[in-house]
Amino acid sequence: MASEKLEKFKTFVRKHPKLAEEVRNENRTWQQIYEEWVIFGEDHEIWDPYLPEKRNEPRTREQANKLADVMSVIKKIDFNDLQHYIDEFSGVLTNVQKVMESFQGGNGGAASQSDTNTGGSSDARGQQPYPYGPYPPPQGPYQPFPYHQPR
């Protein structure tokens, strides 16, 4: 029984090599360490500072397989196609933004790009004189033939 406990303590000391340094530096004795080991057990947090420093642990097979899968997917990507799709998506977003602006009545009162392209005039505040473009709305009843003057 005693030799069994002693063997467990020896394996514990092998797992915590900094304990031997404590004894060599005469900071503690083996008796003190053994008594604390009996009282606290080998899983207590007081032993954490005596664990060996963790080096870069080798990756497990599962991690290596995941990394290999990701790399194989990346190798299969055609970046020219990806750039093409991104450009198309950007164009779609621009069109959606223009439609949203048209439903909101412009972009906050400033002349929109379509107004500047049509030669729209604006007043001193930078706003269009008419809410729906550079020209006034038609007056009077709807005329199916706008160039035909009624008699």
Image: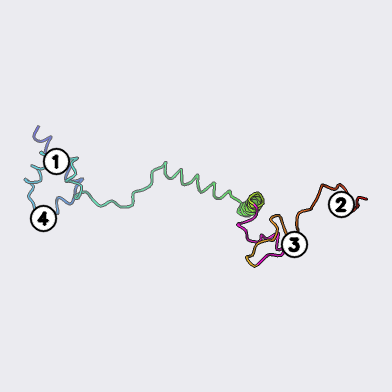
Q: First in sequence: mark 4 or mark 1?
A: 1
Q: Which of the pair 28/136 is nearer the observer?
A: 136
Quadrant showing the N terminus: top left
The colour scheme applied to this rendered structure is rainbow
Which residue position holds label 3? 118
Q: Main secondary structure of the magenta part?
A: loop
Which residue position holds label 1? 9
Which residue position holds label 4? 24
Q: Residue at x 21, y 48 (%)?
A: 51
Q: First in sequence: mark 4 or mark 3?
A: 4
Q: CA distance from mark 2 to mark 4?
A: 107 Å
Which residue position holds label 2? 146
Q: First in sequence: mark 3 or mark 1?
A: 1
Q: CA distance from mark 3 to mark 1?
A: 90 Å
Q: Amino acid at mark 1?
A: Phe
- Picture coordinates of residue 15 (x, y %)? 21, 45
Q: Residue at x 81, y 50 (%)?
A: 140
Task: Provide the secondary structure element on which disc 1 rests.
Answer: helix
